[in-house]
Amino acid sequence: MIKILTDTNWNELCQETSFQLKGFETIVQGKIPNVCNTYDYWAELCNGLSLSIHEVELIDDLVWIKDRLDNLQFGLSFFRSGKVAIQRHSLTDRIDESVGRYYSECNCDFQETEWWKAGEKFSRIYLKIEPQQFFQSFGEQEIEQIPIYLRQATISDRVQPYYQQWETTQQMWMALCNILQCPYQGLMKRMYLESQAIELIAFHFQQFQEQEICDRNFSAKKLSDIDRIYQAKEILLKNLENPPSLIDLARQVGLNEFKLKRGFRQVFGTSAFKYLHDYRLEQARQLLALGDMNVEEVALKIGFDSRSYFASAFRKKFGLNPKQYFQHYQKSL
């Protein structure tokens, strides 16, 4: 059996769990009937840096539709057990998050769907960073050494959404174990957790710098080419019903076809027309949730001439067909 939950459903169910506040720590745990056992730990460590531990064991398979727009949030997420498939709509394809990998992210005005499997215990440690606060004491030369997506956020609120997976190193595993096995309480615990969290951030910066050196030789990383690739994306999104061919799109932005194909995949992690395909389906999902249009009207609105093909593509992406999705939202209103 597959359960479908939205953020609203989840928050209502979580009201039945126990809540404990102890100094700088907050713990929420309990059994959510017919859904899962859950444990959430949250701690404010220092200005602009917090740590959370999330553990859950599901009773049934779950599709979690996060349909609320996220506030601007930067973070590092480290997986210790279990696996979840996610899709950051208009940002990534469906990908697995699992043990041995961690991800860095900037959540900014996009939505997400997650697919969870029953019987697996899922556990992760998450570091939330607020750049303008955390890096406020850093000098200009030091700021130049941090990842670009964080660097931009220290001076401006206008940033691009970002998501990338990395390898969890042995040094990182040791720091994660130290966090879970912290031997202290009170002030000493807070200081100890802060030191381990900052160590994890430093290890991430090291990986980022090494990757940046490897990427410097790719022409798609040149600023002028990146601008053109973003321009190509905007052209596609403005022409949902009748998008240009890849050759025409390359001509419009002043790149050859090879550079556009390679550059688009490097910047957005997928091909230009897979990006367009996913964007169309995400627009369809939002229109169905609003309930102002029926399935056929939505399909035509976002550029699908064939209703059967639209239904098949929607089911493949979201795990249920458009009519089921539409009915589910009407019941929840």
Image (spheres, rainbow, N blue to C red):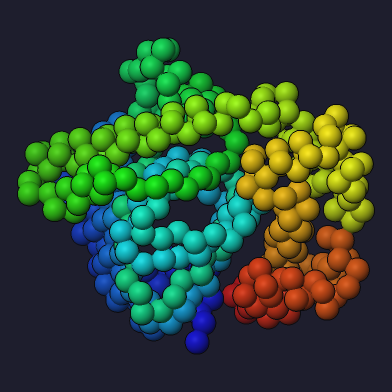
Looking at the image, residue 89 lies above or below residue 246: below
Residue at 75% x, 76% y is 312
Quarter of the rendering containing residue 172: top left
Q: Residue at x 66, y 68 (%)?
A: 317
**Quarter containing the C terminus:** bottom right
Horizontally, residue 212 falls left or right of residue 27, namely right
Could you say which is closer to the camera, residue 257 or residue 31?
257
Q: Quadrant of residue 94?
A: bottom right
Would residue 10 be visible to someone looking at this image? yes
- x 47%, y 48%: residue: 165
The one nearer the camera, 213 or 291, is 213
Does residue 203 appear to the left or right of 228 in the view shown?
A: left
> Where 205 sits versus 246, above or below?
above
Front position in the image: 57 or 290? 57
Q: Quick check: can you spot residue 7? A: no
Q: State which quadrant residue 157 falls in.
A: top right
Q: Position of residue 202 (x, y in %)?
A: 32, 32
Residue most extreme to the bottom: 1
Q: Residue at x 80, y 71 (%)?
A: 310
In the rendered image, residue 8, in percent from the top left (x then y), is placed at 50, 66
Which residue extends farthest top?
Answer: 140
Task: Count up the numbered dots.
Answer: 0
**Residue 245, horizontal then vertical, whole percent:** 90, 48
Residue 59 in the image, given as x and y percentages of width and height: 38, 82
